[in-house]
Amino acid sequence: MQSVHDIYQKEMSKATEGTCQMPLGGGCPNHGEGALNGVCLDSAPHCEQSVRSKSNLVGNMDKIITDCQQGSSYFFIDDDVKRLEGSEGSEGSRVQGVQGVKSSEELKSGIISVPALVDLHVHFREPGNPEKETIKTGVESAEAGGYGLVCTMPNLTPVPDCLENLKAELALIEEAQNDSMKVIPFGSLTKGRRGKEPARFAEMMPYVAGFSDDGNGVEDDDVMEECMSRIAALGGLVVAHPEKGEGLESESREVERDIRLAAKTGCRLHLCHISTRKSIELIREAKREGVKVSCETAPHYLLLEDDEQQTLRNSLDGRFRMNPPIGTRADRIALVDALIDGTIDVIATDHAPHTEEDKRNGANGVVGLESAFPVMYTHFVRTGLITLDRLVALMSTNGMKILGMSDCVLPNVVWGVAREYEINPSQFKSKGRSCPFEGMKVFGKVVRREAL
Ligand SMILES: [Zn+2]
């Protein structure tokens, strides 16, 4: 198993062979014109600065790995980003979006224009618990976070396990969504999400993104197989939450079972919020064997580490408390590797708002819609670990593919990425305030949402 450090060094040596690929904003005077997707594509090495910046990057990764090995319970790449960027000036943020920059004025001011984001995994709590979030506040939160489409999980009251029950949610969605911000619900996999009998798939099929029992994984293998067979026959998607039970091992046990059943039934399977190294290895293997499986992770699993005692989880009013829990260093590094090598298909937020009181009482779940893109952009694109193009695939276009909606056009969202700011959950549109990235310094604020 290669570490992120190995992969990164390999990436960097590749970079000097072909194109420069230095992240823009690093101060290279020779690129800008030939730039695409946040990296310079000029022949390399074409300037001393870019070469120096590359060795800085590798050095920074050394420091990160060392910090991790010394057992920091969590870490951020902030300092490295700042050092990389050097002085933040007018020329300091020449970042170009996949859709191209509109004018040189925008180029100078650090503007990117990318397709609206897609989140396959949010909890909008309505109908059932509007005190935690309503579909309306969820939509506002998603808009502020640069999203154009989100899919809501079915842990609701009533449980959307038949068209009749789904109608309540559909009516609220109809009221809250708009032309550039759509919501598609998931139907439940079993009746009442109790894991005993399949839900009524065919009648819900035209209105849902797929079927899931959310946090209640279906424990009974036979029931899961029956659900998958029926959904496969309808051409639908099963979204599994492998998080049932205690401990990190339970995730990979469910991943293994679900992959086996997907291979057997031919059902399309999407695995939610993968958080462990073991699960990643199983998914990588399944993909190699041609099983129709996709998977997601969330920004907190890529950026945070916890120790065996779960110190982080039990700190700071529960803003690091979610299911599955944040893993160890080995888990996080495996996830970053998987992000780079393509095993991870999408970044989802698992946006799961609670009231302050519920969080105090130990509720699992954190909000993420308004921090996900800035956090990912700052720590993965600006550092050069992935290109902006890849981030857009992870946070937008791959999600559309999984939903079978590649033909649908998403509106563009314009982001300002020149100025650093601190994530402040008290300013969120979401009713949820518990965010693991509170206080983190990031780049990326929505400047404008373009109409379709
Ligand atoms: Zn969830």
Image (tube, grey):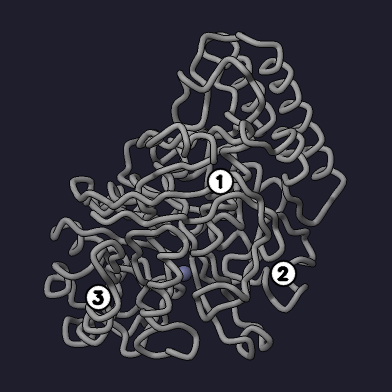
Q: Is residue 1 visible?
A: no
Judge left or right: residue 434 versus residue 155: right
On the image, the x and y values in percent for residue 37 come to: 45, 31
- 4 vs 349: above or below: above
Q: Amino acid at mark 2?
A: Arg
Gap between marks 3 and 1 measured at Cα: 46 Å
Foreground mark, 2 or 3, reads: 2
- State yes or no: Cβ of the residue under disc 3 lies below 8 Å from any atom of ligand 1: no
Of callouts 3 and 1, which one flags the residue occurring earlier in the amino acid sequence?
Answer: 3
Farthest residue to the right: give it: 70
Position of 404 compared to 37: left or right?
left
- Outermost residue on the front side: it is 105
- Badge 2 residue CB within 8 Å of ligand 1: no
Name the residue beneath numbered marker 2: 313
Quadrant containing the N terminus in the rendered view: top right
Mark 3 against mark 1, which lies toward the viewer? Answer: 1
Kindly state the secondary structure of the residue where label 2 is placed.
loop
The alpha-carbon separation of the residues under discs 2 and 3 comes to: 34 Å
Callout 3 amino acid: Pro
Q: Residues within 10 Å of mark 3 (few under 14, many from 20)?
A: many
Where residue 198 is drawn, which disc sits there?
3
Give neighbour class at mark 2: few <14, some 14-19, many 20+ (Cα, 10 Å). many
Q: Which residue is mark 1?
A: 417
**Residue 319 seen in render:** yes
Q: Is residue 135 left or right of residue 324?
A: left
**Helix, strand or loop at mark 1:** strand
Question: Front-most of 188 and 83?
Answer: 83
Q: Residues within 10 Å of mark 1 (few under 14, many from 20)?
A: many
Q: Are discs 3 and 1 less than 8 Å apart at CB? A: no
